[in-house]
Image (spheres, grey):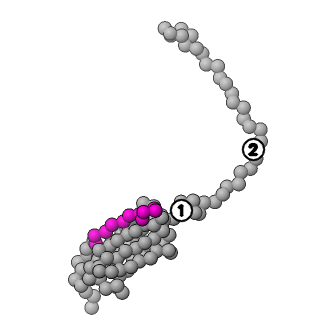
Amino acid sequence: MSVERMKVAPDTVAYADGEHHKLIVEFAIPGAPTESIDVKILPDSVYLLAPARDIEYVSALALGWPVKPDRAEASYENGLLRIEVPFKDPMEDAVKVAIKPGGVEAATKIIDAPVVLPGGAA
C-alpha cells in the first residue's frame, strides 16, 4: 500500500565555491532516511525526491552554468544534503575548425557620394 505524502519544496541554496570551480547545492531535508533520497544531476539541472515521515521533499533546479554530473559528490548529515559538482569548462567540447587558405581577397570599393553643402546644394 502506497503512503500518500504532502509534497514540500525544501529550503535550498546553490552557490559557487570560493575559486568558482564547483557548484555547491544544499537541500534542507530533515527526517529523510539516507537510503530513500533520490538525487539526479544533468549538465543543466538537479532533481531531488526525498520522502520523510508524512511529507515528501521535491525539487528541480535549472542551473545557469553547465556542470559535470559524473563528477558530483554528495553528503548527508543532520538533515542537510550537500552536493558538490565541478563546473564544465565552456570550451571543453569545442572543436577546432580548420581554416583553408583563401583566394584573391576582395578589394575595397570606394563609392563617390555627392557632397551636400549647407543649404541643401550639391
Indicate whether residue 19 is drawn in magenta. Answer: yes
Q: Position of residue 23 (x, y in %)?
A: 43, 66
Q: Quickly name the residue at label 2.
A: 102
On screen, residue 32 versus residue 104, left or right, reads left
Q: What residue is drawn where x is 45% and y is 62%? A: 20
Q: What residue is drawn where x is 33% and y is 66%? A: 13
> Which mark is in front, 2 or 1?
1
In the picture as drawn, the residue positioned furthest to the bottom comes out as 1
Front residue of this view, candidates 105 and 79 = 79
In the picture as drawn, the residue positioned furthest to the front comes out as 18
Q: Which residues are magenta?
A: 10-20
Q: Position of residue 9 (x, y in %)?
A: 27, 71
Q: Position of residue 89 (x, y in %)?
A: 53, 62
Q: What residue is drawn where x is 45% and y is 67%? A: 22
- Dot 2, crowdedness within 10 Å: few (<14), some or many (≥20)? few
Q: Quadrant of the N terminus?
A: bottom left
Tag of residue 113: none
Any part of residue 99 in sight: yes
User: In the rendered image, which quarter is residue 15 located in?
Assistant: bottom left
On screen, residue 58 versus residue 94, left or right, reads left
Q: Amino acid at mark 2?
A: Gly
User: In the rendered image, which quarter is residue 108 located in?
Assistant: top right
Tag of residue 89: 1
Above or below residue 54? Residue 106 is above
Above or below residue 29? Residue 88 is above
Q: Position of residue 118 (x, y in %)?
A: 50, 9
Give whichever of discs 2 and 1 has the lower sequence position. Answer: 1
Front residue of this view, candidates 2 and 41 = 41
Element type where label 2 sits in the image: loop
Q: CA distance from mark 2 to mark 1?
A: 32 Å
- Dot 1, crowdedness within 10 Å: few (<14), some or many (≥20)? few
On screen, residue 3 versus residue 35, left or right, reads left
